[in-house]
Amino acid sequence: MIVRDVKPVFCRVPRYFTRGVTLVELVVSMAVMGMLVVGISSAILLATKAVPAGDSPAETALEAAAAIDQILGDLQYTLNFSERTTNAVTFTVADRDGDLVDETIRYTWSGTSGDPLTRQYNAGTASAIVDNVQAFDLAYDLRTVTETQEQDVTNDSGEVLLAMWDGWPGIIPTIAAQTTKTSEYFVPGIPADATQLTITRVDVKMQQLTLGSGNKTVSIHAASGTGPEPTAAPIGTPVTLPSAGLPLLFEWTSFYFADVVIDNPGTHYCIVTDDDTQNAGEVLIYKALNAPNDVPVGLWSNDGGASWLPAQANKRSQNDMPFYIYGSYTVTTTQNVNVSRYFVTGVRVTIRVGDDALNRVDSGTHVLTEPEVSTP
């Protein structure tokens, strides 16, 4: 066995040396870093300025545009309008919450500069959708359709003389006076197709009594059957004058009515005079034995209207109370008339938010359903 000498093997490990930064390099790098900081700061400042401030024209324009977008988005699907003005609009849209009931939306501005534009949804509380509104205007585009339709047209006569009597032609009557209840039967001169009769005034001849007191009343009554006696209940409100307001001698005295209105009028009525004392005044009556059997008939009652005199039918036409009666009547006829119908086809909106007069936004939309409205 041969043993040889073994020499140790040494590995040489290279040495790495860390090199330092020179002063020149440090100065240059600091200058570069400073330039970078300045650049980044400038970029941040510019970006900050690019973001609109809350009261800037750009911001208010965006707010106005957002408000108009919301308004027009609702108006586009309007089913009908219940309010259309320049500063407010109320309308309905189809059910949005699943309760099968249409929704009601209202936009309004008070018209006062600086007040908000509000939106109300159904019965909820109105809430502002944009503040500091300086102008808000709504305009409605309409489509007009003219059609010929049959319509009931009511024509009013205006005040006219409905009936009168002041004597028998060619007959000199006896002049009498009544202090008790009296009635004068008459037939108003109105067309047979009149739909309403209004009595506005009655003139009768009255005078005071020497020791008169109390009140004199005139009322309008329907006639019983074909007359000539009056029914018990008056039509409308009776008119009362105090005895002291009557003339000293027989003169025409006017009684004005406010609510004697008769729908579907008949042909037989009575003027009834009454008083609350026997000495309230006298009513002029004409009498003539040879009086013709004409339409007006004068009666009187000594028992407050329970019975009427004269009782004999052939003598009733011999008495009459002079009178004039005024009023009006209406006649309704069916006629072909041109009728205009109006449909909203679009809505235009103008809004200005903030103090800048140039910061105004205008826009509009078509209303898809073109709802009909009653007035332009």
Image (cartoon, grey):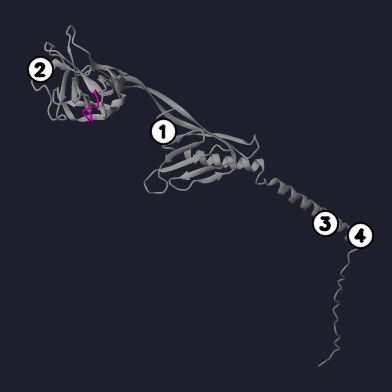
User: Residue 181 in the image: x percent, y percent?
Assistant: 19, 26
The residue at the far top in this view is 170
| Mark carried by residue 315 | 2
Q: What residue did someone put label 3 on? A: 33
Q: What residue did someone put label 4 on? A: 24
Horizontal placement of 38 versus 376: left or right?
Answer: right
Q: Quadrant of the N terminus?
A: bottom right
| C-alpha separation, residue under disc 4 versus residue under disc 2 | 147 Å
| C-alpha separation, residue under disc 4 versus residue under disc 3 | 14 Å
- State if disc 1 and disc 4 touch (CB < 8 Å): no
- Of residues 368 and 275, the one nearer the viewer is 275
- When asked about the image quadrant of residue 179, the answer is top left
User: Residue 52 in the image: x percent, y percent?
Assistant: 67, 45
Q: Residues within 10 Å of mark 1 (few under 14, many from 20)?
A: some
Which label lies toward us, 4 or 2?
Answer: 2
- State if disc 1 and disc 3 touch (CB < 8 Å): no
When the figure is inspected, residue 103 is found, relative to residue 299, above or below; the finding is below
Mark 2, secondary structure of its residue: helix
Q: Residues within 10 Å of mark 4 (few under 14, many from 20)?
A: few
Which label lies toward us, 4 or 3?
Answer: 3
Disc with the residue nearer the chain's start (1 vs 2): 2
Q: What residue did someone put label 1 on? A: 371
Q: Amino acid at mark 3?
A: Met
Disc with the residue nearer the chain's start (3 vs 2): 3
Q: Is residue 37 magenta?
A: no
**Residue interval drawn in magenta:** 275-281
